[in-house]
Image: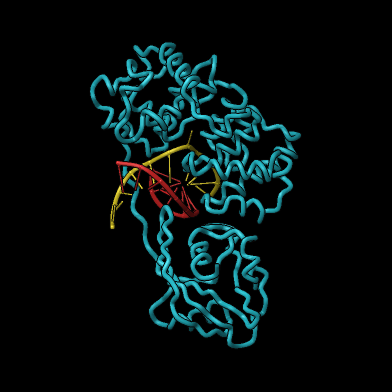
Chain colours: A cyan, B red, C yellow
Amino acid sequence: MEQKQLRNFNITGFQHQLVSWFQENQRELPWRISKDPYRVWVSEIMLQQTRVETVIPYYNAFMREFPTLEALAEAEEDRILKAWEGLGYYSRVRNLQTAVREVVERYEGEVPNTREEISSLKGVGPYTAGAVLSIAYGKPEPAVDGNVMRVLSRVLLVDEDIAKASTRKLFEKILYDLVSKEDPSSFNQGLMELGALICTPTSPGCLLCPVREHCRAYDQGKQEELPIKSKKKKQTSKQMAAVVLRNERGEVMIEKRPETGLLARLWQFPNFEVADQLSVEEQFMKVYDIQVELGEQIQKVEHVFSHLIWNITVYEGQVSGQPDGGQATRRWISIKEIEKYAFPVSHQKIIQKSLL
DNA sequence: AATCCGTGGAA
DNA sequence: TTTCCAAGGAT
């Protein structure tokens, strides 16, 4: 049974105008050259919460280094993290490799083409499943992202909070009826492209819109009031200290972050959250069990995450006692070797200002 | 359902 | 400056 939002809605007219508009106006993007499911998949993972312009150079470089599913499956984890360095949400690329290995072992290297199977892969949620199925395999599956929710909120005058999971599910139900069965790929991409180019969050270009005649929000002049989206709470901040620590050879100490959680498995300079009671030097020795003499503060770096802010004070330091016991997660490296390691953006800033 | 997980650009 | 947010997913 059709969703109530589609009553008295000209489905076929909407489909044809959207698909035609997309075919004539789509941007030339590197992931639109091929329908290779692997290439489509990689692009969709990269594009999660990330702008097209940001993704383009990463995508091109990634495809040069890992041209096939097998190449990615066989790559070393440090290589894939380096390829992702600066993109953020690093679990995306680790999950992608886990998933690709699953495809090699369990699906003979062929990306599965059913929603149930592809959704079972690490990092493939409802959106990515629908995107790959429709774009690479031409299946009439919904692919609901932020663009789609914004566009359909306006076109169908839906005032549900798009921050809620239940609202995404509502749009999925609607889309099973609304998606073009002739060209699901162009339809889904057209919805997103429309959201990116015309039906933008602020100041939508309604006068240029190919589906304006179908738009209930435009009809009522409410396009600027939709979609409804509740605000998320703002970040808490932490005071951090980081140390560019050198030994007698002039090498610098770095360490690998933990297996899970924030910035998992990236490399960083030794750092910790500062407490008021002890000096930064004493706190360092307590955390790392290395005798050091700290020099002056050399810079301050702010690192803004989606839910957290680090205010990092960076110090220079010298090992003063016996060298460190040598833990597997710690490494002394020369400046020349730094480029081999993947660092979070805040630590890239430290490198640029203090080491290069 | 709410929180965690990055980053940079635009308004 | 602050806020929002961009082709979301895992827990």
- View extreme (bottom): residue: A321
- Residue A169 in percent (x, y) is at 44, 31
Query: Seen in the image, is A255 located left or right of residue A14?
Result: right
Q: In which quarter of the image is residue A46?
A: top right
Q: How many labels does the image show?
A: 0
Figure quadrant of the C terminus of chain A: bottom right
- View extreme (front): residue: A356
Residue at (49%, 44%) from the top-left corner? A54
Figure quadrant of the N terminus of chain A: top left
Depth check: give the residue in front, A10 or A299: A299
- Residue A114 in percent (x, y) is at 63, 27
- Residue B10 in percent (x, y) is at 35, 42
Depth check: give the residue in front, A281 or A202: A202
Residue at (50%, 41%) from the top-left corner? A48
Q: Is residue A232 above or below residue A351?
A: above
Q: In this view, does A307 lie above or below A17?
A: below
Query: Seen in the image, is A55 located left or right of residue A68?
Result: left
